[in-house]
Image: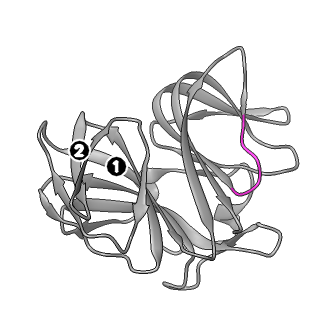
Amino acid sequence: MTTTNRMLAAGTILHLADSTKRKWAHGEVREIAAGKLGPDATLLPAEGNAWDWRLSVASIEAAGDFTRYDGLDRTLTVIAGELLELTIDGAAHAVEALRPLRFSGDSAVAAALPTGDVLALNLITRTGAVRGNVRIVELSKKREQHLFGAQFGVMLQGKATMLRGESEETLALRDTVIGGEEDSPRISGRGFMAVVSLDLP
């Protein structure tokens, strides 16, 4: 999928179902968006495969070794399913749902599925070019969740609405909202959202 300037504009909703599904070694993956960061940390679209950050959702349906991503950092969050077991450079990690795990793409990683298939949100950033962070927030109708510049909000569970100015739009499961500094999108509802933040190192 090619990311366009329009798609990276603040307040844009990216529907996961609109992205191309492709196979990978352990299941299927859909890319949400990919690109670079400008000098002022603005989101810039990727040109082909020349990107410094990439956000995607992937199913993990088979155990085995992950592909190495040399020179990149990865943050993996299980968003459906119960448990993913990762062995990273020989150390075991039990990755529970909605608990982001960050690790180097240079690492040797093997996956096991003790409770069955899982779905994972994957953030990959180029080491030294972009820093990435993923946190899980519980949404509330009483306290709006703002999304600022170089931030994405990925709807994981529940029901919510994006508010911007006087307009509002209902979010579907796994919709992604792009944040902005001016008239930043606000999310109101019930459930959980992954807030993905990108920054310059």
- Classify residue 37 by image quadrant: bottom right
> Residue 100: x percent and y percent?
43, 44
Q: Is residue 149 magenta?
A: yes
Looking at the image, how many numbered discs can be counted on the residues?
2
Residue picked out by circle 2:
84
* Quadrant for the C terminus in the image: bottom right
Picture layout, residue 138 above or below residue 100: above
For residue 19, say whether it is visible.
no
The residue under label 1 is which amino acid type? Ala
Residues at badges 1 and 2 in contact (C-beta under 8 Å)? Answer: yes
- The foreground one among 54 and 163 is 54
Residue picked out by circle 1:
120
Look at 78% across and 51% down and name the residue there: 180
State the SS at label 2. strand
The residue under label 2 is which amino acid type? Leu
> Residue 40: x percent and y percent?
83, 69
Picture layout, residue 58 above or below residue 93: below
The boundaries of the magenta stretch are: 146-150
Q: Is residue 200 magenta?
A: no
Is 20 displayed left or right of 8 in the figure? left
For residue 25, say whether it is visible.
yes
Look at 75% across and 40% down and name the residue there: 185
Look at 55% across and 74% down and name the residue there: 127
